Amino acid sequence: MQKVKKFITDSVDEMKNKVSWPKYRDLQNSSILVLVASLIFALMIGLFDLAFENALEWFYAEF
């Protein structure tokens, strides 16, 4: 049980004193960047899916 307690106290100490946390503004900027990039990729994948669907429908209609 002592090992578990030491592990928890060491983990809390490391999270408080040794981890470099980003500033709130940097975190906001990164989150917005991830959101915008995700939306762009989702739109691109949606457009590719629509194009392939239309191409396959045309192809199957021809044969």
Image (spheres, rainbow, N blue to C red):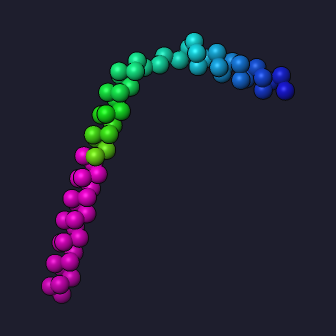
Q: Is residue 5 magenta?
A: no
Give the side of residue 44 with respect to residue 34, left or right. left
- Give the image location of residue 14, x and y in percent: 61, 17
Furthest toward the right, the residue is 1
Within the image, what quadrant is residue 56 found in?
Answer: bottom left
Work out whether 26 lies above or below 41.
Answer: above
Which residue is pictured at 40% across the width and 21% down the height? 24
- Give the image location of residue 54, x and y in percent: 19, 72
Which residue is pictured at 24% across the width and 52% down the height? 43
Quarter of the figure with the C terminus: bottom left
The secondary structure making up most of the magenta span is: helix
- Give the image location of residue 37, x and y in percent: 28, 41
Within the image, what quadrant is residue 33 found in?
Answer: top left
Quarter of the figure with the N terminus: top right
Give the side of residue 32 with respect to residue 19, left or right. left
Furthest toward the top, the residue is 17
* First to last magenta residue range: 40-63
- Give the image location of residue 25, x and y in percent: 35, 21
Which residue is pictured at 58% across the width and 19% down the height? 15
Which residue is pictured at 76% across the width and 20% down the height? 6
